[in-house]
Amino acid sequence: MVAFGKKLKETQIQEWQGYYINYKLLKKKVNRYTQQIQVGQQDRPYVLKDFARMLDDQIERIVLFLLEQQGALASRLSDLGEQHDLLLQQQDESRICELQEAYRAVGRDLLRLLNFVEMNAIGLRKILKKFDKRFGYGFADYYVKTRANHPYSQLRQVFKQVGVGAVVGAISRNLADLQDHHGSYVSIYDQPAPSHLDPVVDSIKAAVNRLSHSTNFLEYLGKHAFIMQDDELTSPSEDHDVEKRYHFMSLLLNLVNTFLYMVNTYIIVPTADNYALSLGAAATVCGVIIGSMAVAQVFSSVYFSAWSNRSYLRPLVFSSIILLVGNTLYALAYDLNSIAILLIGRLCCGLGSARAVNRRYISDCVPLKLRMQASAGFVSASALGMACGPALACLFQTNFKIYKITFNEDTLPGWFMAVAWLVFLLWLWISFREPSLETKEEIVPQEANAGILINYAVENGPTQPLLLNSEAKQVDENEDRDYDDSEESAEIVHKPVTSIASAYRLLTPSVKVQLFVYFMLKYAMEILLAESSVITTYYFIWSTSSVAIFLACLGLTVLPVNIIIGNYISNIFEERQVLLASEIIVCIGILLSFNIATPYTVPQYVSSAFVTFVAAEVLEGVNLSLLSRVMSSRLSRGTYNGGLLSTEAGTLARVIADGTITLSGYLGESRLLNATLLPSLFICISSIFATCFTYNSLY
């Protein structure tokens, strides 16, 4: 099948010369625009309009050719349908094989057409990315959104594939009819789906799946996980290697690890202030108790990310063991009457944060066709854990002793999580399959070669057949020297960074602003969640159960809000517009939370908390979706990747927020609310101004 694919591409490129997107011409045009703007001959509005017009002309030529070819295929299928009808009347089974082969020939021609669409789609994405990289603003986002939703859009015709679906259906139906029934001629619509598809139909469906995107919600939620999708540069050989390394149970264990860690993080929030009081500390020490886990996570994220370069099983085993120890120490601190033991237990829990390993496993060991769903699963597991943690704390309203060990609402969260991590450790040891390291190491050079081969195919497809990798690399280097001296070579583009400083140098001003926005929203959310038990006890005399139910309800808003944003809001507004609007709403929620009038009421606190939390959740999804598109591709792999940078920014925000709560506690519980909201308000306003300053470069 691979040999057939290579032959197919070579003959197709020769026969359909002139119908591919002219990548070389567009690339020269971008270089010319750059020179004209530098010397002041053209302004940016003209460049945008002129380049959009050129792309429209190119895509229109492609679409008209596509419709012409689809019409030819439809005509052939119509003729074959007439022969099929005659065959039904004559009951001549000797011609079945001949007719089957004729349908397969149409299928092979359809496969050529799908390859034509795929090559042009890659060329379009590459030129849009090049234009944005050169001029520094979101032309790609503007062009795709304006053309994709317009009723007369030619771009829409390329990606909808309505005609292709009809042809695939006709070929599949008739081949199945001829193959499975041999004279009975029962409709396939009345029978179960065939277990073994014809190889041609199977290849067509695989090609259609490559061209089709996930649903908006899955795509949005997948980007929310910030697992960068480098699909353009993924070669078939690489994806085949990843498929060999993929193991469903291992992926499931990574998602369970994510879920349990989020439960572990939030299960103590409703009872942390009571636990501190029972050990003789102030209630506001809950900020240190909650934040100590985040302090340790700042360091654990780095060494777990580095460890995942060599293994996945060992860091997950270490994570489970240290979380088991940490939760046991947290629970024993009550009987030992030691705040130090309690903090050491929480630090151990933070040192067991394997979220970097979970993200890395999805990025490296899940096939491209499943990666978006796995990324969405990562976010869903996190959200579910965030809601389940406080809800479980609500169930632990009991008090008894076994020997000298106390089990009550303060210690049961620790004992419960210790048992959960022990069970997970046993499951992990039995079921996890370590991916092959040899395959993993071989992927890096394959990625570089794949990128060069695709680049050469797109640029030279209309004139020459595909070359060997070494020849393509040499030609590509020569063309880059002539047409784009500033473009990085494939080796440099795919080389992962080796330090935090190197990663920081790759961040553009707009990316830095988005990381600051991420810091802001995590700070605001941590202030809201971590001090909730102290605030509600002081103002409203809420019980632990009431606090737990309130926090669980907040956590349950995560997925519904993301569904609304992913399916509707993001299709109506640009993501940068949603970003700025969400920041403003977060600011409004913080302002509504201040205790200015007396008495401070439950409706005011609850409504302002929901406004702040929901807006922050919207902001997080949009922010990470933008980051996944604009961050350098060099940060999609290696130890110091984009996921690590965003995790560090969010974790640092949590550490500072928890420290703010504890320090503000020295002012007294009556001033705690306003004292913690003031820094949050200042950071939020700063992020709004920063976003406005870089608004035109966000896309």
Image (cartoon, rainbow, N blue to C red):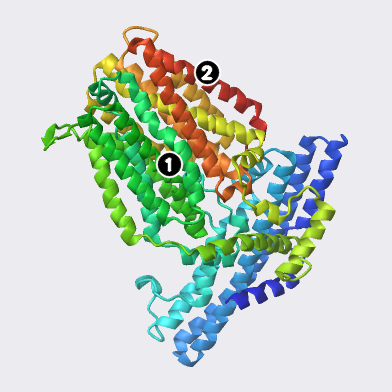
Q: Is residue 201 above or below residue 242?
A: below
* Residue at which label 2 appears: 682
Choose top left, top right, bottom left or bottom right for residue 398.
Answer: top left
* Residue 76 seen in the figure: no
Q: Secondary structure at mark 2?
A: helix
The amino acid pointed to by label 2 is Phe
Residue at the disc numbered 1: 563
Image coordinates for residue 522, horizontal then vertical, percent:
46, 30
- Residue drawn 22% across the image and 28% down it: 545
Residue type at mark 1 is Ile
Residue in the picture at 30% in, 51% down:
424
Tell me the number on the disc at residue 373.
Answer: none
| Furthest residue in direction top, as rendered | 598
Nearer to us of marks 2 and 1 is: 2
Judged left or right of residue 263, residue 690 is right
The quarter of the displayed image where residue 467 is located:
bottom right
